[in-house]
Image (tube, grey):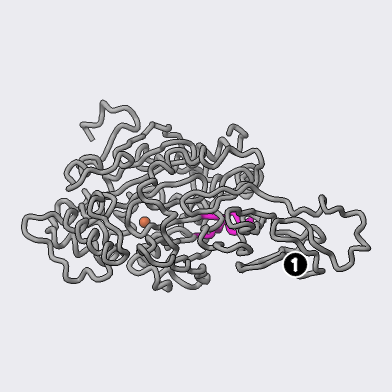
Amino acid sequence: MGEHVNLKPGEARCDAPSYQDILDRDTREAPAALRAESAPFLGDEPIPVEHYTSQEFFNKEVEKLWPRVWQMACREEEIPEVGDYMTYDIVGKSFLIVRTKPDEIKAFYNSCLHRGTKLKHDQGCANQFRCPFHGFTWNLDGSFKENPTAWDFPHLSPEKLQLPEALVDTWGGFVFINMDKNARPLYEVLDILPEHFSRWKTEDCYKFVHVAKVIKANWKVVSEAFMESWHTIDTHPQIMPYLACANSQYDVFSDHITRQISANGEPSPHVYDKNYSEQEILNSMTGTSGRIVDASNLKVPDGQKARAFMAEASRQAFAEQDGHDYSDKSDAEMLDAMLYNVFPNFSVWAGYLPNLVYRWRPNGMDVNSAIMEVMWLKRCPKGQPRPEPVPVHWLSEDERWTDAPELGGLAGIFEQDMGNLPYVQEGLHASGTGEVNFGNYQEMRIRQHHITLKKYLNDEI
Ligand SMILES: [Fe+2]
């Protein structure tokens, strides 16, 4: 485009109002977190397809990346009582996440110190951990309790039989673990995240949906499908009447923390020529949003904008549902798609919508498949007991995301997202150049993903 010739790489933007311009027109001032912008130019070199296809590269990730990063293992609400436990598996390792005291959570390597059996492979509540093979038994705190034939193991002291642990910390109601005893503290790695979420408080939410499925694509192919919004034009054309996709904002705050924001209730610049009415914009939103239970009777009054109208309708509907007061919350916080990522494999939506959470993991040691998990958090109703979190619903290989009705209108969107990915993986193997290319701005978060990954693989972080 002619007007872009004098711009440096990374400075060009979609020729439409920016996300910040949209915030300027809103009915309430957005919080400082949403006014922050950080868009460094990160380079425009191609990335080798081996990052996604090579078993050797994958093995390096197993050796250098996964043992050294903070990973979201579960929600705190899933282990509320002493003795409650969850398991978390990652590239052949397994952890037993246990509430050991009312205010203490530990993560033990989930492997018997006798002959290696996994101590647990499910979730539940226990007062001890007894190996199902020979009965070596541990106390909740990981100290050794007993062995049915202790006379035969004089060489194993209680110290030797202490269950080894990973580091544990929490933020936002999530439990994180790190295998590296010398890891930087979680709060340092989270950078601006706790400050930004101080308004949205995911710790005050409960998990009402959790769906998981194995996807036949590398874990980075899957995760990077959720690091830009501009695939909407070909992947989700039905949401373009209400999603400002091409003029989304992208931010890289640090090696570990990135963000994208797309305004809702504003048409995509790709469909400006269709001149959708405000009512048409609203109608396109209500089917897929998960925001308002019954939006069928909503009518945008003459002279009002769908965005402002939907924000106000959401304030009222949410207050009715959960008893909280949303009257001073900004339009953006009531509507927009705001995804924050914590490198390498955790993403949480911000704002007062039911917050989506994504977790991506390699599927065991397979470079060509990954586990995609979609969790959905809702604010706990005011003055009522905390609702129980749901257990995970695993979809089989043959099932589609639309076979998870609890995802509502989002199921079809996830099916569109995920349906492409096996073909991405196959196409990467089929590449004629051995390289992929990223946009300078819209795919900045994906480039940062590879930059940070490289730092881990090269021991630079
Ligand atoms: Fe998508």
The reply to whether residue 221 is in sight is: yes
Q: Determine the residue positioned at 78% across, 64% down.
A: 137
Q: Say which of 188 and 40 sits in front.
A: 188
Amino acid identity at mark 1: Arg
Q: Label 1 neighbourhood size at 10 Å, few (<14), some (14-19), many (20+)?
A: some
Whole-percent x, y for residue 167 in the image? 63, 47
Whole-percent x, y for residue 319 in the image? 27, 62
Magenta span: chief secondary structure: strand
Whole-percent x, y for residue 123 in the image? 60, 67
Which residue is labeled 1 in the image? 130
Q: Which residues are magenta?
A: 360-372
Q: Determine the residue positioned at 56% across, 55% down.
A: 73
Residue 128 occupies quadrant: bottom right
Q: Say which of 282 and 401 sits in front.
A: 282
Split into quadrants, the picture shows ligand 1 in the one at bottom left
Give the tally of numbered discs.
Answer: 1
Whole-percent x, y for residue 341 in the image? 44, 47
Answer with left or right where residue 171 lies relative to residue 312.
right
Answer with left or right where residue 114 lies relative to residue 390.
right
Q: Is residue 4 magenta?
A: no
Residue 281 occupies quadrant: bottom left
